[in-house]
Image: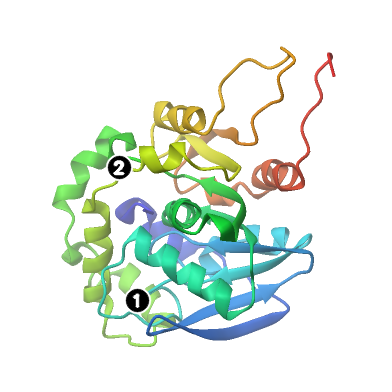
Amino acid sequence: MIRTLFLATSLILAPATALAQDAGNYADINGMQLYYEVSGSGEPLVVLHGAYMNIETMGDIIPRLAESHTVYALELQGHGRTNDIDRPITYQNLADDVAAFMDSVGLEKADIFGYSMGAAVGLQLAIRHEDKVDQLVAASVAYDASGWQPAFTEFIPSMTPDMFVGGPMEEEWKRLAPNPEGFRAFAERLIQLEKEPMAWEEDVKTLQTPVLIIAGDADVSTLEHNVALFRLLGGGAMGDMGVPLPASRLAVLPATSHTAVIAQVDLLEGFIEPFLAGDTPKGMFE
């Protein structure tokens, strides 16, 4: 769900971030050698990147979160050092891969942080494998295709692999890919992902998993859609009326586009850590 042309430049220029602990592991998952890195200590937190991204291009948020969590950062099908396979890239397939990964490393349950495509994968993980998700942080997500900004919806039908093949995005992808000749097929799968039906309202309404929704105020999903998602999860009512606040939360980053969300490390940490810890600001009536 990381929005292709909007993201190409930021992917290429993003600084590489070295993780200090148990880097460079592979798990045999659904016909893939899924690459992951482990860093930090504390309660487990699984980190899921956006489309066309990898662990490095997630930037400084991973080492920041590793200061207080044991972070499992994954590279999903065809991304980074994980090989592509002859299977559609769908949010449901990727969510099942994450569930299988957690089983393979003995993670019965964990918090999840996903950005863009990774946030939608996290949402599907909570829908399909709710027992594996303690709390979900979903940055730049949608639960229905109607939630995308009109400019992006209009752009989707014109997307083709030739927009990316032979360009800097392919060169960056080749740097880590196990099969450097496979970029066109990979791009075709991700373009098809943008065209897949997305209508998850009924599933979202049944979720019991606490969700922190994070969005930029100029994100690829509309502000109205993020508020609607918050309401589906039980949010949006008035506080200070003697009723506990819902477990889910909504945070909107000011002056922030889709590709700028993941770079707002201080703001992200300031929202994520209290949510995962269950800390709530106290009102004057408490």
Colour mapping used in the image: rainbow
Residue 51 in the image: above or below residue 248: below
Residue 235, located in which quarter of the rendered image? top right
Q: Is residue 16 visible?
A: no
Q: Dot 1: within a 10 Å radius of its alpha carbon, few (fewer than 14), some, or many (20 or more) residues?
A: some
Q: Earlier in the sequence, mark 1 or mark 2?
A: 1
Identify the residue at horizontal 56%, vertical 65% (top origin): 15
Residue 113 in the image: above or below residue 77: above
Q: Residue 172, image x and y in percent?
A: 39, 74
Q: Quadrant of the C terminus?
A: top right
Give the side of residue 285 with respect to residue 229, left or right. Answer: right
Mark 2 residue element = loop
Q: Is 44 in front, or is 205?
A: 205
The three-letter amino acid code for the residue at tag 1 is Glu
Q: Residue 157, image x and y in percent?
A: 15, 49
- Residue linked to disc 2: 199
Residue 49 in the image: above or below residue 232: below
Give the side of residue 49 with respect to residue 225, left or right. Answer: right
Identify the residue at horizontal 56%, vertical 42% (top origin): 208
Residue 153, located in which quarter of the rendered image? top left
Marks 1,2: beta carbons within 8 A: no
- Residue linked to disc 1: 171
Residue 9 in the image: above or below residue 275: below
Residue 188, located in which quarter of the rendered image? bottom left
Mark 1 residue element = helix
Identify the residue at horizontal 40%, vertical 31% (top origin): 225
Q: Is 195 in front, or is 129?
A: 129
Q: Which mark is residue 132?
A: none
The three-letter amino acid code for the residue at tag 2 is Ala
Identify the residue at horizontal 39%, vertical 32% (top origin): 222
